[in-house]
Image (cartoon, grey):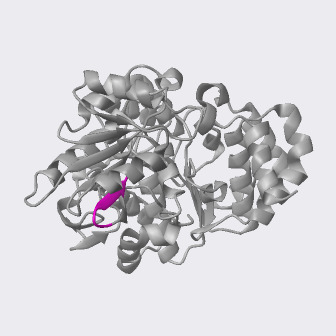
């Protein structure tokens, strides 16, 4: 079996949520526990940090991993989805899992796995835990896939749990209300494991407090003691924070949402230090500044080209896109700015109406669809956008939409590409923008 054959096996034999959506979702932890026992419970061989939330999980997870790595810890990182290569999901000190291990894992375990009919995420999680054990990591940062309570990563007993925020997403599985969604995310809160809450509302705070009290653990709300004093953008992809502990803290992750994430990370670092993690200031500065280089993170307010600037972001729900829309409007109001151009596509199981209501009216839109089954038809998106006061033309591929936007743009224009993780993935597979994750 080759690596490509192994990945194709995963895609075809186990349903992949990012491609097919609801039919790939499996509720409950039976398969996960069964597979974990078969493999010898590898996740018990190293410390873990568990990260859940509607948005910001990836940025928080990658930055924490970069800081721990810079502190001298051999660090595993498990995130999803991937953009251009399956191996992006599973990293040790920033390096993706080897193709050889992916092949070996499938060949050794397929006879055991197939009768269980596991989901793609169940198999991938088991693979990640096994790789981290084989690599003898000191600590692994584990991002939930969907929810928390019944997410298959929730078999771990971490040293710290983090819930970034709660917003409306995946309501078919997690509930139609913010308290309902918060309840599912709060499922990662465990006895004697401190939990950081990045953002909250009065109604979600109550849910988190009740769960923490139920399992007798300490809860810290990062917003109650904000560590960010101010922020200043030096260019579209570089921001410098003034913080209570670290003056002029430079971050390689821009975007207005990142201020909240940075505050969550700084709060989490205080807790990790209480857990006897040795994290020097130099490592914190290096991790914030070089997170993308150190961990391969892409698609978070990423500047991929200049003159005109082309920025992409994987924000894909109303909670995340409100920050993006605000940032775009602020940039387009600056003197000397040209035309805002937005290449946009979405998937067919999101609340599109709420998202479209947030988007800038002063932009020219290039409506498109990503190369996955879940992609919303571009013509349907255009028609819904018209009802929200947005106008533009339809393009049948992301590449066609981006190429047209570039051809029509002046050097002082800004082209934003987003609306869906998969639109960004298609952008980053274009030869002129491709960088291996």
Percent coordinates x, y for residue 381 in the rendering: 39, 28
The spot of residue 30 in percent (x, y) is 74, 31
Q: Is residue 220 above or below residue 281?
A: above
Q: Is residue 190 above or below residue 331?
A: above
One can see residue 355 in this view = yes
Residue 353 horizontal side relative to residue 435, left or right = left
Q: Which residues are magenta?
A: 306-313
Q: Is residue 309 magenta?
A: yes
Residue 435 magenta = no
Residue found at x 73% / y 48%: 126
Q: Residue furthest right?
A: 111
In the image shown, does 42 or 365 lie closer to the viewer? 365
Which image quarter holds the N terminus? bottom right
Count how many numbered circles sit on residues in the image: 0
Residue 357 vs residue 131, the one in the foreground: 357
318 or 191, nearer to the observer: 318
Front-lying residue, 2 or 89 = 2
Rendered residue at 70%/54% (across/down):
129
- Which quadrant is the C terminus positioned in? bottom right
Return the x and y of residue 329 as percentages of the image width and height: 17, 46
Residue 68 visible in the picture: no
Tell whether 291 sits left or right of 375. left
Given the current orientation, which residue lies at the most extreme left position? 335
């Amino acid at each position: 079996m080759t690596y490509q054959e192994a990945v194709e096996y995963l895609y075809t034999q186990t349903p992949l949520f990012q491609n097919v959506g609801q039919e790939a979702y499996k509720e409950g932890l039976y398969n996960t526990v069964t597979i974990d026992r078969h493999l010898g419970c590898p996740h018990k061989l190293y410390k873990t940090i568990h990260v859940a939330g509607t948005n910001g999980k990836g940025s928080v997870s990658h930055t924490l991993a970069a800081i721990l790595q810079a502190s001298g810890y051999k660090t595993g990182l498990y995130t999803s989805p991937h953009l251009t290569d399956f191996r992006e999901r599973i990293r040790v000190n920033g390096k993706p899992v080897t193709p050889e291990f992916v092949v070996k894992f499938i060949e050794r375990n397929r006879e055991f796995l197939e009768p269980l009919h596991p989901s793609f995420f169940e198999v991938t999680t088991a693979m990640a835990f096994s790789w981290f054990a084989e690599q003898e990591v000191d600590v692994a940062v584990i991002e939930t896939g969907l929810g928390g309570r019944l997410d298959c990563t929730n078999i771990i007993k971490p040293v710290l749990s983090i819930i970034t925020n709660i917003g409306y997403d995946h309501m078919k599985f997690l509930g139609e209300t913010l308290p309902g969604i918060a309840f599912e995310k709060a499922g990662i809160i465990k006895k004697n494991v401190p939990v950081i809450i990045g953002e909250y509302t009065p109604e979600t705070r109550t849910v988190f407090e009740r769960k923490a009290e139920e399992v007798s653990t300490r809860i810290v709300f990062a917003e109650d003691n904000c560590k960010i004093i101010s922020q200043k953008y030096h260019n579209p992809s570089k921001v410098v924070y003034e913080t209570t502990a670290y003056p002029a803290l430079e971050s390689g992750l821009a975007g207005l949402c990142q201020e909240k994430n940075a505050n969550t990370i700084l709060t989490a670092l205080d807790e990790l230090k209480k857990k006897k993690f040795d994290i020097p200031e130099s490592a914190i500065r290096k991790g914030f500044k070089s997170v993308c280089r150190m961990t391969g993170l892409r698609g978070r307010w990423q500047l991929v080209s200049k003159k005109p600037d082309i920025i992409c972001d994987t924000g894909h729900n109303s909670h995340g896109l409100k920050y993006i829309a605000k940032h775009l409007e602020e940039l387009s109001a600056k003197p000397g700015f040209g035309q805002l151009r937005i290449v946009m596509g979405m998937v067919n199981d999101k609340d599109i109406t709420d998202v479209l209501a947030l988007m800038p009216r002063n932009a020219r839109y290039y409506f498109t669809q990503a190369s996955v089954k879940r992609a919303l038809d571009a013509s349907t998106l255009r028609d819904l956008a018209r009802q929200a006061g947005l106008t533009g033309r339809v393009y049948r591929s992301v590449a066609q939409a981006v190429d047209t936007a570039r051809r029509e743009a002046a050097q002082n224009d800004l082209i934003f590409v987003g609306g869906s993780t998969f639109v960004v993935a298609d952008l980053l597979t274009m030869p002129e923008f491709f960088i291996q994750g």
